[in-house]
Amino acid sequence: MSRPKVGSSDIENPHHAARRAAARVLRVPVRVGQHVQLEPELFVLGRDLTRRRYRYEVYRAEPHPDFAKRLAIPGPHLWLTPSRALAGDYDRLSESCRWVVARLVRDGLLPGRSQYTAVLIMHQNHNGMGQFLLRHEPGWGYALPTKRRQPRESYAAAAERVAREELGLDPAKLGLMLAREAVVTARDLSQSEQTSTFYCHGVFEATVPDRTAFTSTSPLVWVNATTIIAGQVHDTIAHDGNPAPPAPVSPTAKHILQELDELPMIDPDVVLL
């Protein structure tokens, strides 16, 4: 952070002050980009307990590409994700910094917690009706087969892991293809972390060959669009021939299928008056 300088004849503009602050920290030439002005906020200063109202001009800053490989920040410093900065796990983080990050996350300008996944949409035709494969996860309900993408892993490699590890299938025999919308994004509450999360789902599709034998530690079910829109699986037989546990359908599965035009955006049984 830096206050714009006030001279005898002029006041430094916020853009220049942001560039100066970034260069002071990164110790290389920088460039600043996207800019947002936050509403003024009243803070009580820890030094003398006085109250002051601050207005923040926030800029995205980065090392100039010509100097990015020479980045060497001197002295103690931390790189934190927005969610980690707001989690309250670390002491001595500036109250004003946390406030700025929280406002940017609230307004959708920072992702907060991010999660990257690979998702498989498996199709089959049953009695002339299209069906989708869902996998049951305790505490989550029924969702499209999914795996988190590992660091430096491609979406395609993660999708192959989904086929092998969640379905027991050879991905080479499935002919996995990128969906029409290769990446579907969503902001949702993480059930495991109980925090707002920005999801990027890399979506792949495949048609399951007849008599495919699945191997899964969790029940797999074939359901139609009506079941997914209704949001509940019940009275269904799982892939192993046993009754599938009744449970809700993940809203994420519905969102992804609707984004790909696999499901209507509204319930077709609803009558609009």
Image: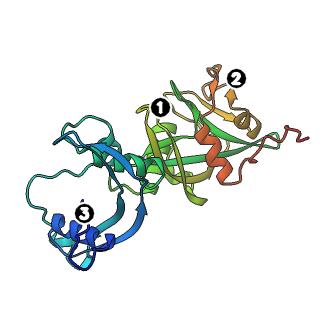
* Residue at the farthest front position: 8
Estimate the spatial distance between the alpha carbons at disc 1 and disc 2, rounded to whole Å: 22 Å
Of mark 3 and mark 2, the one earlier in the sequence is 3
Return the residue at label 2: 234
Estimate the spatial distance between the alpha carbons at disc 1 and disc 3, rounded to whole Å: 40 Å
Q: Secondary structure at mark 1?
A: loop
Return the residue at label 1: 191
Q: Residue 270's x, y, as percent?
A: 85, 38
Above or below for 232 versus 113: above
Q: Residue at x 41, y 68 (%)?
A: 34
Q: In the image, what residue type sits under mark 1?
A: Gln
Which labelled disc corresponds to residue 142? none
Q: State the residue in front, 43 or 182.
A: 43
Q: Secondary structure at mark 3?
A: loop
Q: State the residue in front, 80 or 242.
A: 80
Check if mark 1's residue and mark 3's residue have beta carbons within 8 Å: no
Return the residue at label 3: 3
Q: Quadrant of the C terminus?
A: top right
Estimate the spatial distance between the alpha carbons at disc 3 and disc 2, rounded to whole Å: 60 Å
Of mark 1 and mark 3, the one earlier in the sequence is 3
Q: Secondary structure at mark 2?
A: loop
Q: Residue 26's x, y, as percent?
A: 18, 66
Q: Residue 88's x, y, as percent?
A: 28, 35
Between tags 1 and 3, which lies in front?
A: 3
Q: Is residue 69 visible?
A: yes
Q: In the image, what residue type sits under mark 3?
A: Arg
Q: Residue at x 45, y 56 (%)?
A: 109
Q: Residue at x 26, y 76 (%)?
A: 64
